[in-house]
Image (cartoon, helix red, strand yellow):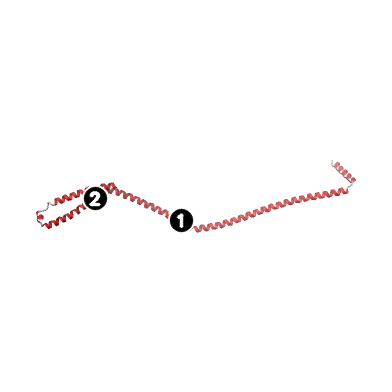
Amino acid sequence: MLGALGASAGSAARFNGVGYVMVAHAEANAAPSASPQEHAQPRGEGEQGAEHSQGILPVIARLFNFAILVGALYYFLRSPIAAYLASRDTQIRQDLVTAKEMRAAATSELAKIDAKLKALPAELEALRKQGVEDVAAERTRIASAAAIERERLLEHTRREIQMQLRVARRELLEHGAQLAVDVARSRIVGTITPEDQLRLVDRYAAQLSEAR
């Protein structure tokens, strides 16, 4: 684009030079074409006309040069500016679409967050109720487990007591039997005579012979 501006500026300069040459040539040609009547006018009026013509012609030359410069700039910069404006239009449209999508996404996220915030008290209440129910269930489970463990311990204690009672009863019976045997032995030893012993031996032998 800078190259195009430089070329257009050079061309405008050339056009300006041509314009000035054309204007100067027109002024030179216009000066000798004056009629004899104009030469016959008084000198004061001729000087005023010359000053008037010299004031208008530079303005016309500048306007002509400016028009040429504008035309050159338009010719050389039309395509780059059109391409730049088209690309900017496409970029702006794409940015608008992206901004619209981002706005829609942000609106959706805000709606979701708002819905979650509105549902938060109910969720907290549900969690509180669930916590209370869980605590109650845990207490019930612990109480049930404690009762089962207590029954198990009681049953084990009862079995231990019964076993100890059976052992003690057996030991007591054995001790009583041993005492009875000792008492009977002492009585027999104290009361039986050798003749009684012989009779007992004979009776036992007779019983054995009968049993055979």
Residue type at the position of mark 2 = Leu
Residue at (52, 58) in percent of width and height:
124
**Looking at this view, is 91 or 5 the one in front?**
5
Residue that carries the numbered disc 2 in the rendered image: 69
Residue at (47, 57) in percent of width and height:
117
Instruction: From the image, state whether disc 2 or disc 1 is nearer to you.
Output: 2
Q: Is residue 211 left or right of residue 5?
A: right
Q: Are marks 2 and 1 in contact (CB under 8 Å)?
A: no
Name the spot of residue 167 as percent of width and height, x first: 74, 50
Can you name the residue that lies furthest to the right here? 195
Up the image or down, 189 lies above or below 52; here it is above
Q: Earlier in the sequence, mark 2 or mark 1?
A: 2
For the C terminus, the quadrant is top right
Specify the quadrant of the image occupied by residue 56: bottom left
Secondary element at image label 1: helix
Residue that carries the numbered disc 1 in the rendered image: 113
**Looking at this view, is 47 or 96 the one in front?**
47
Residue at (55, 56) in percent of width and height:
131
Name the spot of residue 14 as percent of width and height, x first: 22, 47
Residue type at the position of mark 1 = Ile
**Looking at this view, is 175 or 141 the one in front?**
175
Q: Is residue 120 left or right of residue 35?
A: right
User: Could you say which disc has been placed on residue 88 in the image?
Assistant: none
Few, some or many residues within 10 Å of mark 2 (<14, 14–19, 20+): many
Q: Is residue 207 left or right of residue 41?
A: right
Name the spot of residue 86 as percent of width and height, x first: 32, 49
Specify the quadrant of the image occupied by residue 129: bottom right
Residue at (73, 51) in percent of width and height:
164
Rounded to the nearest whole Å, what is the CA distance between mark 2 and mark 1?
61 Å
Q: How many marks?
A: 2
Secondary element at image label 2: helix
Few, some or many residues within 10 Å of mark 1 (<14, 14–19, 20+): few
